[in-house]
Image (tube, rainbow, N blue to C red):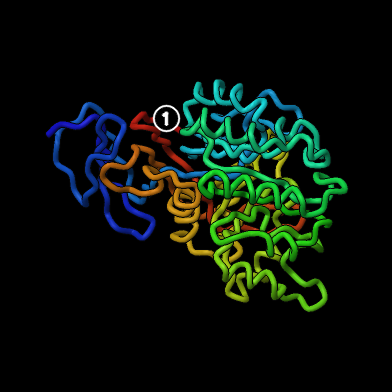
Amino acid sequence: MSYDLIIKNGKTIKGNPVEIAINAGKIAKVSEKIDADSKELIELEQGTYVSAGWIDDHVHCFEKMTLYYDFPDEIGVKKGVTTLIDAGTTGAENIHEFYDLAKQAKTNVYALINISKWGIVEQDELADLSKVKEELVHNALAELPGFVVGIKARMSKTVIGENGITPLEMAKNIQKENNHLPLMVHIGSAPPELEEILAHMSKGDVLTHCFNGKSNGIVNKETNQIKDFAWAAYDKGIVFDIGHGTDSFNFHVAETALREGMKATSISTDIYIRNRENGPVYDLATTMEKLRIVGYEWSEIIEKVTVTPAENFQLATKGHLKEGYDGDITIFKIEAGQKIVTDSNGFTRETKEWIKPVKTIIGGTVYDN
């Protein structure tokens, strides 16, 4: 048997030896040892890890926007990330233009469609509810079924104006009318109150910015404990997604949650050009390092950027190193090294370990990091 590509001498994040063969863009074989011919061979140095391709399920990468935008390959393939999910930058009126650009990227790009028809053209896209047209969303879903993997509603006071919880009720109705498509909900300052938002969310819905440091967040500032209603939502199966961003990840909140036994379900960046170039986000690897500092194991961190987002957004051929899955692979090293990292509120911690992508493989094509 001859393959297009064989990766030799790798190990999984749990330390097990692994070799992988890829044919026609798909994983053809996964084994401790593969002895076969191949057109291309990657022989890894000792101590190099291999995982399914990293997935960042909250980014902003439609380059024609002005508020929140970036270029897919700058935050994707160049950073060890094989798959991006743009979280509601565009709505039904401009998502086709985004699709035309996104399919030119080397990185796999998917989108959550903003329930507001122009997306985040302005900060308050849900202040005018005439911009929410269920029929337009339905049409876009029908026209771009392999690209649009969910819907997005931003539920914080700068976005909703005087509309309270109504935009989320509308989003839930759109979800119900479209085969219970995945829904991501952004949270921030009240109104609406976090308790009311969570009460409207269902099992499997994604709450992004879960560890923000705002008073409308999950920690009671007086008792320094996770609020009871946040625990109830977590136990109900609402997905707690990091969505780091410029303003939405706080070390103390993440550490408080972990101390009580609450871990983020998935890890994402909310990256766009300003917080990539100026921080505090920079890239997915840096966000992963921050969760390591908080106290997560590397094995669960890798799971939260592979298996979990693939399941949450129904990417059926991604997230696993298994035969028949897409040939999307991240090859990386974990090295000892000290650096200071900063959360969204200016608080710092010192990391003792760096995670460094070495090669990014997308559909069997190898890119060097």
Tell me if I can see residue 257 in this picture: yes
Residue 94's spot in the image, x, y percent?
A: 66, 25
* Residue sticking out furthest to the right: 162
Please tell me how crowded label 1 is: few (under 14), some (14-19), or many (20+) other residues with Cα within 10 Å: some
- Side (left or right) of 108 relative to 349: left
- Side (left or right) of 169 relative to 352: right
Answer above or below: position of 266 versus 74.
Answer: below
Find disc 1 in the rendering and name its residue.
367
Residue at 72 percent across and 76 percent down: it is: 225
Residue 324's spot in the image, x, y percent?
A: 27, 42
Quadrant containing the N terminus is: top left
Residue at 54 percent across and 34 percent down: it is: 141
* Residue sticking out furthest to the bottom: 223
Query: Which quadrant of the figure has residue 270?
Result: top right
Residue at 76 percent across and 31 percent down: it is: 121
Residue in front for this viewpoint, 161 or 250: 161
* Residue sticking out furthest to the left: 1
Answer above or below: position of 106 versus 17.
Answer: above
Residue 57's spot in the image, x, y percent?
A: 55, 45
- Side (left or right) of 85 relative to 249: left
Amino acid type shown at disc 1? Tyr
- Side (left or right) of 9 relative to 198: left
Answer above or below: position of 16 versus 261.
Answer: above
Q: Secondary structure at mark 1?
A: strand
Tell me if I can see residue 331 in this picture: no
Residue at 21 percent across and 50 percent down: it is: 31
Residue 114's spot in the image, x, y percent?
A: 66, 38
Q: How many marks?
A: 1
